[in-house]
Amino acid sequence: MQINLPRPEVLDYLRAHNSYFLFSHIEPDGDCLASSAALGRFLEAHGKTVHHFNPGPFIRVEIQSYREQFLEALPERVPEDSVAVVLDCSTADRLGHFADSVAGMPTLVIDHHSSSDPFGDLRYVEPSAPSTTLLIQLIMEAAGHTITRDEAELLLFGLCTDTGFFRHLDSFSGVAFAAAARLIDVGASPKEAHARIFGGKSLASRKLLAELITRAKELAGGRCLLTYETLTDVATYGKDNRDSDLLYQLLMGTETCTVIALARAETATTTSVSFRSRDGTDVGSLAQQLGGGGHRAAAGCLLEQPLEAALATITDLLANLDFPQ
């Protein structure tokens, strides 16, 4: 794993202005929110004014404590010197209703996802990085900032979120473990991060998990598993009872599976799709074919198709997927 350090112009951008508007992606996870929170604390420590924005919804149990820090609308008056930093977004549409506002501001994009539709005036995008929080940590360290215990806890939480508590990392990932070690030495607790990510789940979440596992369909001789969530599931169990991480973990542990696709009916006419892989299959490229993005091992997209049609589209793609030899 080779991750480029932030270029001087990235550090200059974070020094040059007085007011920073930090934006992160729709249906946020621990990495994007922790990235925003940690970068905000870094900027405030250096005398900057910071506002955090996220379009929501705040579904995941482990991120509920962040909700109050993030605004869902811009203030009526935006300071003239305000600039944007977009975190953990591969494409502008992932900003939801903030996309148009960001398009009218000077923008730095910090992300670890590959993209078929890059945006922003300045970009620090490293697809080989396992999380955006790791890139924020590298920015802080490159700027000579002394990371506090609170900042370290945020950064470790984000890194653990996107690596599945490190189980997604492969050989030659020492840079990520070294970064985590520096955070732990400051006082961040792996034990507390694990409890926060994997604890506090409801019985309804386990029942929904059982439904999705039962529906899993083998494709490509069992190398791919495809499952789906219906609007009826959402009405029955609620979006806050989704536990995608454990679903991926359990399905990926089956004998021949190396790629997982999870389709979710978002409305009667739109379907979100998430992909995961463990054998080097590039699901980021797969998502790009459908107008989305991500990295080799994790990616996603939004299809303007009802669930049934989306499942047919995904099935065709997975049936003809090129697997590493």
Image (tube, grey):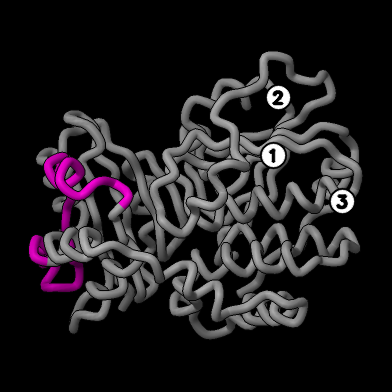
Counting residues from the start of the chain, the first of labels 1 and 2 encountered is 1
Q: Position of residue 80 (x, y in %)?
A: 82, 19
The kind of residue on which mark 2 rests is Met
Query: Which secondary structure, mark 3?
Result: helix
Relative to the observer, which residue lies in front, 1 or 41? 41
Q: Position of residue 185 (x, y in %)?
A: 75, 82
Q: Nearer the viewer, mark 1 or mark 3?
A: 3
SS at badge 2? loop
Q: Is residue 54 left or right of residue 277?
A: right
Q: Which residues are magenta?
A: 214-240
Tell me where residue 151 sits by quadrant. bottom right
Residue on which disc 1 sits: 85
Name the residue carrying label 3. 45
Identify the residue at image location x=40%, y=53%: 60
In the rendered image, residue 111, in percent from the top left (x then y), is placed at 60, 51
Q: Amino acid at mark 3?
A: Ala
